[in-house]
Amino acid sequence: MTNTSVLIAGAGPSGLALALALLQNGMSVRVIDKGETHKVGQKGCGIQPRILELYHFMGVLPDIQKKGGLICPVIHYLPNGETKTLSMVTKGEVTPDKPCSEPLLLGQDRHEQILREHLAKYRCEVELGTELVSFEQFADHVVSRVIKTHDGQAVEETIESRWLVGAEGAHSVVRKSLGLTFLGETRQENMVVGDIKIIKPQLDEFWHSYGNATTKSVVIRPSEDPAANKYQFFAMGPQLDMTTVASGREAFIKEFYAVSGRTDIEFGELVWISNFRPNIRMVDKFGSGRAFVAGDAAHVHSPTGGQGLNSGIQDSINLAWKLALVDKGLAAPTLLDTYTQERIPVIAAMLNKTTELHNKTFTQGVASYDAWKRGPELYQFGVNYRGSPIIVDEAGTPESLDPYRSGDGGNLRAGDRAPDASGLVGEKTRLFDIFSTSYHTVLIFSGADPDVTEILDLLKAYPVGSLKSVVILPQDAAPPAVDGSSADFVLTDGEGHAYKHYNGVVVVRPDGMIGALVSGVDGLKQYFKGIFL
Ligand SMILES: Cc1cc2nc3c(=O)[nH]c(=O)nc-3n(C[C@H](O)[C@H](O)[C@H](O)COP(=O)(O)OP(=O)(O)OC[C@H]3O[C@@H](n4cnc5c(N)ncnc54)[C@H](O)[C@@H]3O)c2cc1C
Ligand SMILES: *[C@@H]1O[C@H](CO)[C@@H](O)[C@H](O)[C@H]1NC(C)=O
Ligand SMILES: *[C@@H]1O[C@H](CO)[C@@H](O)[C@H](O)[C@H]1NC(C)=O
Ligand SMILES: *[C@@H]1O[C@H](CO)[C@@H](O)[C@H](O)[C@H]1NC(C)=O
């Protein structure tokens, strides 16, 4: 049998995040990309706070924070000569349960580079110039046909792997070959996007927005890297001749001057430019047999709202741990069905949300406060899998909840994001330093069955390395409250933050979501029966 467990086609953010999460789960991975060089362009440049949390679990966050910047306010130039300034981002508060309070700005090319650097630690390098053209599934493996292009020479090869994931963007070969539907619509709004250098003046403190998207508008914004003098621009509107504007540097500059009147701006090199009409589509299924899709291969939408790249990474983190357990023979292949079951409702809500913002932009114009406001519901804290068949909640089936609620308030139920808790005393000081994309975490609180030893014994019956147990004693516990000596961690809730959200026994999945809220051994058995063989 082949020793490549997963072949990933496409080295965009979805494919790279998937590769890293799989490697952290001990899988062997190959990542191919048809591009002969790495792509340039800031494109999906907003990283939502929930993704920053997932990156914390994966050890990527410090590098993202080092290179990322904050999203600055937008200044609208109105027809009457006045200006209107609006802060797009509602900065949340850093709280003990939410350490990441606002999105970070990071060009997609620099973001991808960070992920590649992390892959390199596992000796995984993206195989460039390697295009997936077709594949065939067998009982226990997949054979993929690829075309390798180097220095103008094309060579055909086959790659054998146990699984195949198509993270190759909107034109996904895997999606088409599997015959997954990709229903939706192509909108008629014209858009041109790209990156360009500006020689002078410096426009570093704001996004600058000119014109009106109901007719024609241009927006230009600084990148997070002040030394680069690189700006991302958007031109859009029904009256925009997108083919002409995207035809080259001079055409773009001419249009920019015409719409903005800012002929004082001296442009440098055009880094890249592209024109498109937004597509709003999604698959009916995220895979079949041994082949899956993730990211733009599974869903495309309007760039308004900055959800695409982030949703792709959430797809990958949802899939990675399931694929790893099934590949290792620890879980039944049916666990992989829950990838579709859990992601479909979230993506449907995401398309609706981004379309709503898109509609506002093009009907009310770019100067509409309403259309530009990016509320905390876009932070993806509210993404939940309450309807999933593998979650267990002894308080009853959780009522379904819009993934685009803000993620604040309401009762914590199985299927929700597991909140952080700082102020722990012991070997670890916060829950997020324990959670990992490569194992389940079982949190045991004082509301659990009194026999903690029995719970810990049960957990030992599950595959080695597949979970960590954490006994959390109340703030005022008089030691020795419980015998937690055989737990991986025994911590005290020094500031009471953990007990504010949690009680009983809580299973946190490798994707940071609550798999089970139960009281003891019976509930745990029920949950893990749905996961492990
Ligand atoms: C202008 C613009 C602005 C955007 N702004 C945001 C934003 O603010 N926030 C946000 O979240 N999202 C944003 N997006 C969307 C975001 O860029 C995409 O959602 C994201 O790139 C999807 O990542 P992916 O990894 O799924 O696919 P992609 O990034 O499309 O990567 C797919 C990769 O697969 C490769 N490939 C294609 N076919 C094959 C093949 N047959 N074999 C091998 N390799 C192949 C491609 O070369 C590519 O490298 C924006 C998009 C655009 C265009
Ligand atoms: C989609 O958005 C519309 C308009 O904002 C809203 O009325 C509707 O309830 C949403 N539907 C879903 C399924 O989220
Ligand atoms: C967006 O606008 C389109 C066309 O005007 C409409 O059909 C659709 O229902 C709107 N969607 C949302 C979510 O507002
Ligand atoms: C943009 O156009 C819309 C529709 O014509 C109009 O309602 C709105 O006031 C305009 N905004 C500005 C700032 O001109």
Image (cartoon, grey):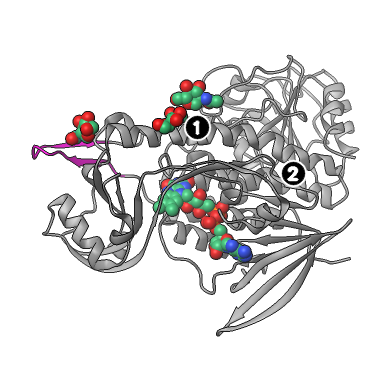
- Quadrant location of residue 519? top right
Query: Label 2 sits on what residue type?
Result: Tyr
Any part of residue 482 in sight: yes
Q: How many marks?
A: 2
126, above or below 154, in the image: above
Left or right side of 210 for 472: right
- Secondary structure at badge 1 equals helix
* C-alpha distance separating marks 1 and 2: 33 Å
Query: Label 1 sits on what residue type?
Result: Asn
Pointer 2 residue: 439
Residue closest to the eye, 23 or 479: 23
Measuring from the top left, give residue 478's x and y in whole percent: 70, 20
Report the magenta residues as a range: 72-86
Q: Residues within 10 Å of mark 2 (few under 14, many from 20)?
A: many
405, above or below 147, in the image: above
Residue closest to the eye, 444 or 320: 320
- The residue that appears at 24% across and 53% down in the rendered structure is 204
Measuring from the top left, give residue 505's x and y in whole percent: 75, 24
Pointer 1 residue: 352
Q: Considering the image in quadrants, where does the C terminus appear?
A: top right
Measuring from the top left, give residue 116's x and y in whole percent: 57, 64
- The residue that appears at 79% across and 36% down in the rendered structure is 487
- Secondary structure at badge 2 equals loop
